[in-house]
Image (tube, grey):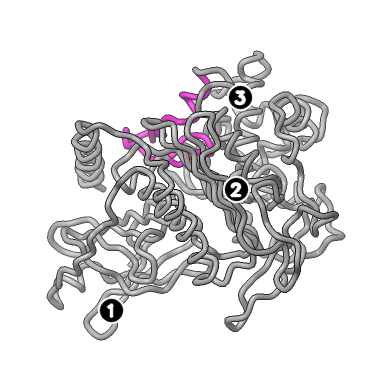
Amino acid sequence: MSHSWIGCIALAVMLQGCAMQTAPSGVDLSTTSTDAVDAMAAFALDESQIPGMSVVVLLKERTALARGYGHEEAGGTARINERTVFQLGSIGKQFLASLVLKLVEEGRLSLDDSVVVHLPDFRQLPASLRIRHLLNHTSGIRELFTQPEYGAGIENLSRTAAELTVIARQSPVDFAPGTRWSYSNTNYTILALLVERLTGTPYEVALTERLFQPLGLSSLRQCTPLPVGPGEARGHVLRKNKVAPSAPENMNWIRGDGGICGSALDLARWTRLLATGRVVSSQSQALMAAPTRLTDGREVEYGFALSLVEPDGRRKVAHGGAMLGFSAMAAYYPDTALTVVVLTNRGDVRTESIERKIARRLLGLPPPVLRDRSLTAEQRQRFVGRYDIGVFEVSVSERDGRLWLQMPRPGPTTALVHLGNGEFVGEADPDAYGLVLSPGEGSAQELLLLMGAMRWYGIRRD
């Protein structure tokens, strides 16, 4: 299977980024620009039917913008601000990855340790599985969310963390470690157990004592299923085009892979501290923000709980978070020391799209020009098919002379706009969904999907 086309795309993006950097770069924090950001946030709140949202922008250490929009709960009176606490979802993986690296710095473990050395009761895991494979999602361990046993307990508040451990221990391994990238929350569930066994402390306590308290990030903590006091946002979902409170999720079953709550202000501070080597050592931070190299030499745009995708041609280190009733995005732009955080109290919101629009405005980047380049019927048929991206399959289908992207929820079903050379964006939200299908003769064999501010690597299955 050839991946030379991926390398060509990566080179093109790199060259584009280099060309852009020849001009003086900066961040526009004029009143006109921040007012424009304010208008963007207000528009997104209304357009996406979001009850409440918090946006924080830092330039280096300076808080350039910190504002709340809407309310803690739909129909309520308590307003959102930059200190309102939200569920952060998978952004919380950064906290656990940082804690693991601190243990590495202390000599308590190595990134190249076999996982079964530390977790001998996980007998289904191959001896070749290393700590780093869990951190960068190349373990091959199947996603928890795809396992029926997990789905049956996520909203059952009586299920215990010990029961979650049983499911994680029994999760199958679908490919040899290091041979493929496939996002799996199970990796971080296992890492949390490993940390607990090494430290003798619940992982949530270890995070608080070793990271959050020393860094002065007092809002960061393990979530409760529902808010327990003022200043905490309530989660919501969209049902039949109406906003409704989301069901509480069992936080015993969201450990390591998510389950941490905090404010946009503290998350922005964390993002800046991590990027500048003040959470872990500069060497460890560089490891977190380095691309993953697979066993066949290919590079993946993902580090340790950090996505390295550059959709607008600027270096960017980011991650999103999605819970049943919350959506989140935190991004850092190293070349300009710009941090952008967007938190909302509604699930299935494309916060990465909101963040990209804000960042483009502040960085002075023009919005992309989308011109749909027509394809012949024969050309469209090259791309039609099912593609395995690891977690689930996505489909490219043809309807009335157009190509469509289809995937299980919370993924989209959207018409595709062809930008040329097998590159597409989702018509429903071009900033949230992108697609590159391998060029050449015959059926496309590979797919690159931009979703959740991450690149997903797909292989044709029909």
Q: Position of residue 191 (x, y in %)?
A: 66, 36
Magenta residue span = 283-307
Name the residue that disc number 1 marks: 398
Quadrant in which the C terminus appears: bottom left
Q: Is residue 243 above or below residue 363?
A: below
Name the residue that disc number 2 marks: 90
Q: Is residue 120 above or below residue 231?
A: above
In this view, the mark in front (1 or 3): 3
Q: Is residue 403 visible?
A: yes
Q: Position of residue 269 (x, y in %)?
A: 60, 34
Count residues near mark 3 (Cα–Cα under 10 Å), then give few for <14, some for 14-19, many for 20+.
many
User: Considering only order in the chain, which callout, 2 or 3, is on the residue closer to the N terminus?
Assistant: 2
User: Considering only order in the chain, which callout, 3 or 1, is on the residue closer to the N terminus?
Assistant: 3
Give the label on residue 279, or none.
3
Along the line of sight, the residue nearer the viewer: 385 or 365? 365
User: Considering only order in the chain, which callout, 1 or 2, is on the residue closer to the N terminus?
Assistant: 2
* Tally of numbered tags: 3
Contact between labelled residues 1 and 2, with CB atoms less than 8 Å apart: no
Tell me if residue 209 is in the magenta stretch: no
Q: In the shown orientation, is residue 281 left or right of residue 150? A: left
Q: Is residue 391 visible?
A: no
Along the line of sight, the residue nearer the viewer: 42 or 214? 42
Q: Is residue 421 above or below residue 187?
A: below
Residue type (three-letter) at the residue carrying disc 1: Glu
Q: In the shown orientation, is residue 431 left or right of residue 111? A: left
Count residues near mark 2 (Cα–Cα under 10 Å), then give few for <14, some for 14-19, many for 20+.
many
Count residues near mark 1 (Cα–Cα under 10 Å), then give few for <14, some for 14-19, many for 20+.
some
